[in-house]
Each structure stands twice: as structure tokens, then as C-alpha cells.
Image: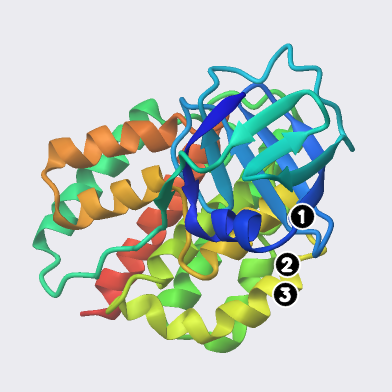
Amino acid sequence: MIHAKSGDNYFLQQLVETEFMGTVHSVFKHALNICSIANGEIFTLATKGMDNAPNTLVIDLVTLDNLHINQNDQVRMKHHQLLIEDKLTIAIETAAHWQCHLPIFPSDTTKLKQNIVQVKQFIDIYGKSGGMKRSDSPVSEFEAETSRLLKQRTALLHEELCNRRFDNFQQYALDLVGLGPGLTPSGDDFLVGLLTIIHLEHSPCSIYQPLCESLIKMMKTLTNDISYTTLNKAAYGQVRESIHVLVSAMLFGTENEAIQALKKVLAIGSSSGTDIALGLISGLEANIKLGG
């Protein structure tokens, strides 16, 4: 039996308060995704090296290799334990409850402006290319064209944000969904960062919050299940712990604290962390401009 270390409050509620049943959607070395039979929602089991995240339960395992868990294996709750066939049993009572609570956007943005400069410089040097950050030597014409489109469309979206053009905001956001490489495409990752900033309390960009519900519905068919789940949560201000820590550090921390938090985000996926960070920066810079 494996013990759960921590879990998203909503996921734990689903496990305890409903007769949770699902099937294995996909399995990776450090994450296992479960599709709920009740509504098709995706939930994740993550190894203990991963951070807390929406719809995620962190379990006391270093790796998911060698468990022989396969796609479509049955998942169910029984006696406060989450069972995957006879291959894995997880005690959930040991899980510490976690929920994302984004910080409040400050009235004084002096520290933020300083941190943005440092973070952008760090990303220029150490950020992973291939997604939002253009590769110096693209391996193919397709990669070069994808990079061009990402740059063009994110620039257009940023301009709409800064100029309060509500009519075009949704369309430019939709133009990014599913665009780029990776399990979570680069355009999706950028939007996760941007949606995070839109959901900061007192954020000038929060004027776009009323559009998020209809926007996320339109995204459903434009990307894969895993990426859509992350976007759906971000559209309601729910993001993984490392992103939350980076936003807080950029708003209120020292330059060193912002860079240390950035390093953890940049480690996400292949280029996902870099793409998310650039989405955060786009939103934060729009906030500064909108706030005067």
C-alpha cells in the first residue's frame, strides 16, 4: 500500500464524497492520469517529486515505472483507498489538503517591474526553446513556422488585452489553443500563464474574467484532454503550486526569490515551464499598462 502525501481539495472531495470510479487515461514516469466515469474529467496521480496541482494527488512513490499499469485499467474507491486494479492501492487519509489561493495584485508595482526585468533576462538565457522561445536553429520549416505563429498570435493577444478590445480577445486566445509542440501545446501553456494573471484579485486584467467561462467551453475541442483540464482549471484561477509561488515572488519577493521560483517553473515539461512563464509575464506587463 502507498500513502498519499497531499492532494487538491476538490479531488479529495470527489474521492471521499462520491463513489469515484474511472479508468486509466495515460501513464508516464511521474504522472498517471485518470478519466472519471461520471463526467470525463481528468485527475492525476503524481510522484512525490512533483508539486501540488489542481485535480492532483501526490503519492509516496519516486516513479510509476514497473507497476505495469495500462491504459483503461479500472480505478475505484474502496474503504478510503484508491485502487487501480490489483496493481496499486493508495491510502488517501494521509493526504494533506491543498488548494490554490492566488495572491492579490498590489497597488504599488515598483517591485514587480524590477522582477519582470530580471525574470525576462533569465528566460532569455536559460529558458527552453522550441515553443514560445524561438530556437536559434529550427530543425524544420514546420518548427520555424510554428514559432512565427506563436510569436505573432501572442503579440496580437497582448495588444488586445492592453487596449481593452473585448470583442477580439476570445478569438485571439482561441487561435493559440493547440498550437505548438508537446503534450501540452505551447499556445495552451502560454494561456495558462495569462489566465492566472487575469484571476489575480485587483488585477487590472481581471476585467476579462467574465469572458473566461465561455472561452473555456470553446477550447474543449481544440486541444487534448490533459491540456484542456489544465486550461479549464486556470480559467477559474486554479494552477499548480510552483506557478502560484512564482507569481507571489514576482509581485512581492526579492529578485533572487523571483529567480529561484522561476527555476522551478522552467523545469516543468520540455518547454512548458518557459511557455507558462512567458504567459505570466505577458499578463503582468498588460496589468502594468492597464493600471497606468
Residue in the foreground of this view, choosing between 202 and 143: 202
Residue in the foreground of this view, choosing between 227 and 68: 68
Q: Distance between the residues labelled 2 and 1?
A: 7 Å
Residue in the foreground of this view, choosing between 154 and 63: 63
Label 2, secondary structure: give it. Answer: helix
Asked where in the image residue 29 lies, by quadrant, the reply is top right
Q: Which of marks 3 and 1 is nearer the N terminus?
A: 3
Disc 2: which residue: 219
Disc 1: which residue: 223
Are the residues at dot 3 and dot 2 in contact (C-beta closer than 8 Å)?
yes
> Residue at left 66%, top 71%?
216
**Residue 57, x across and y down, in percent:** 55, 42
Are the residues at dot 2 and dot 1 in contact (C-beta closer than 8 Å)?
yes
What amino acid is labelled 2 in the image?
Met
Label 3, secondary structure: give it. Answer: helix
Could you tell whether 3 is left or right of 248 in the image? right
What amino acid is labelled 1 in the image?
Thr
Asked where in the image residue 127 lies, by quadrant, the reply is top left
> Residue at left 44%, top 37%?
51
Disc 3: which residue: 217
* Vertical placement of residue 225 versus 13, above or below: above
What amino acid is labelled 3 in the image?
Lys
**Residue 78, x across and y down, in percent:** 72, 45
* Vertical placement of residue 196 versus 117, above or below: below
